[in-house]
Image (cartoon, rainbow, N blue to C red):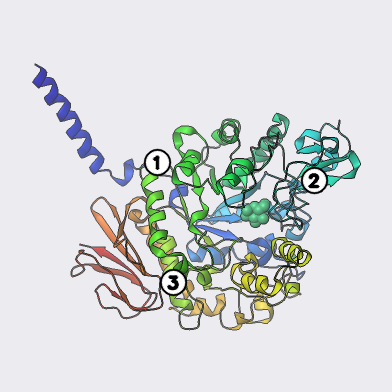
Amino acid sequence: MKRFFLNIVFLILAINSVKSQTKTPDNLDKKWWKEAVVYQIYPRSFKDSNGDGIGDLKGIISKLDYLKSTGITAVWLNPIYESPNDDNGYDISNYREIMKDFGTMADFDLLLKEMHKRNIKLIMDLVVNHSSDENKWFQESRKSRTNKYRDYYYWWPAEKGTPPYRWSFFDVNSNAWKYDQQTNSYYLHYFSQKQPDLNWNNPKLREEIYSMMKFWLDKGIDGFRMDAFQFISKDPTFPELPKETTSNSQNMIKYYMHGAHLHEYIQEMNREVLSKYPNAMTVAEGAGDSAQEAMNFVDPARKELNIAYHFESVDVGKNILDYGLVKYKKMFEDYDTEFKDKGWLAIFLANHDQPRMVNKFGSDTPEFRELSSKMLSTFILTMRGTPFYYNGDELGMNNIKFDKIEDYNDVDTKNKYEHLKETGGDLKAFLEGQKQTSRENSRTPFQWNDTKNAGFTTGKPWLKVNPNYVSINEAAENKDPNSVLNYFRKLTKLRKENPVLVYGKFDLVDAENPDIFAYTRELNGEKLLIILNFTGKNTTLKSDLDLKKAELILSNYKEITQDFNLKPYESVIYKLK
Ligand code: GLC
Ligand code: CA
């Protein structure tokens, strides 16, 4: 009898294991945002429609056919809300209005309509760790200690002494507390002085934010990218920082972010807002320090967010090869292991806070700029996770490397420079470093054609155009079948036509190889092999896989020999048979 039961148990186990091995695309947990190719637009630099030198919504509308032609399926717009632009829109003075530089609400409604007409989704930036100091809430809050908006922000009364030190990302004095005479108190600003932190411990504030989110979702937007949201929950008692705390130590997480109520607030947001818009997608900027922490934000059972984008994929210092490719690959493998069965990740190598992808992960020399841009695009479009692709990378745009501080507009670079100046630091070395690391490098105007100012504006551009626009521009690349742009188009098409690239499992090949990032993607017996040479030299992959019968799908070289010897920055995709 016992045996009989055991046999039944084994039978059930066997059936289940067969079932899980033969997962078809139809019983995968399919979602539009897993299949999407998200394109990030930095609106200030994309296209100016009225000659004031600043990109705007009408400019974006005029380029929607271009966007459609690249094969992207969703757009993430950096903040376009009303803002005095201390941090280019990340300091919001009115969450329900459009920044005048960018246009009107009517322009916005038209943009959304025209995007949806083309089946392109729209994801908005949600910046709610802080507002602008010019926001009505803050204007009220600073008036008196009894104002009804007082507790929308963090205040420290001066009679309690100077507040416990907190380091600020963008402050000239590197101090996150600013004294405000009117009420003899300090307010907290993790970012610039014009970005006071919102107090999420106040339920009224949370309600306001949820209602604002509904305002945009009711207009029909398709989701939010959550800015700096790891910081929203803070310990309001602000305990003294241990001395050894630095910007990237564990203490940073403990004392600055991931407060006790972080997940509770996100779950509340899900209950109050997101659950009512089941097709909307949310992507978390930064999601902790480990794959496990990232999972906590997007594990479907926890009912929080959908996609995690973690910083480890760009936190590699100035250059990936100095950092070490083996370590880098291991990091992706660890994340993939954690996310194999549930949750979802974003794949990205650049954004508006980073230098250009080709400078950091490839090479922008005349010899290798195009090759390495194509190789990196292949990486983003063939990994497991939703690609977040930064505007201009599809042209292989590269760092501008400004020489002078006057050329910079960014609060980050400018304030750090000021701080160094005041404290007698090495300004020359700082400026040299910024050529590689400054986020301004990726914010220069989009290069549309070889006419004045790259066709970005008829006026004076708000930030200098990279002089190489005469040869690197959309019009020229559109005509050239071998351009980076047309290669990108092939990749988006490939991803669309091959669910294996979206849902297929990921396995590293030759993990210890210091030059090559290679992996297979596999679904329902279909198996692709992707091989990417991250160096400017010839190198060889070690693998037992059989290439003899493999079908070549795509490569960035015209002629390739079907073996494991790779040319500089070569990328190749095979279908294994
Ligand atoms: C995020 C944004 C960055 C901004 C900061 C403050 O990191 O991506 O551009 O400066 O938050 O809002
Ligand atoms: Ca304009």
Q: Nearer the viewer, residue 236 or 207?
A: 236
What residue type is disc 3 on? Lys
Report the residue at 46% width, 83% height from top. Answer: 367
Q: Residues within 10 Å of mark 3 (few under 14, many from 20)?
A: many
The answer to which quarter of the image holds residue 329 is: bottom left
Report the residue at 61% width, 37% height from top. Answer: 259
Residue 111 visible in the snapshot: no
Secondary structure beneath disc 3?
A: helix
What residue type is disc 1 on? Lys
Residue at numbered disc 1:
342
What residue type is disc 2 on? Asn
Residue at numbered disc 3:
374
Q: Residues within 10 Å of mark 1 (few under 14, many from 20)?
A: few
The answer to which quarter of the image holds residue 16 is: top left
Q: Do the residues labelled 3 and 1 touch (CB within 8 Å)?
A: no
Residue at numbered disc 2:
135
Q: Which of marks 3 and 1 is nearer the N terminus?
A: 1
Where does residue 39 sit, x and y in percent of width and height?
A: 54, 59
Residue 360 visible in the snapshot: yes
Q: Is residue 208 left or right of residue 293?
A: right
In the displayed image of the protein, which residue is found farthest to the right?
Answer: 182
Where does residue 313 sit, x and y in percent of width and height?
A: 48, 57
Reply above or below: 72 against 244: below
Cα gap from disc 3 to disc 1, whole angstroms: 30 Å
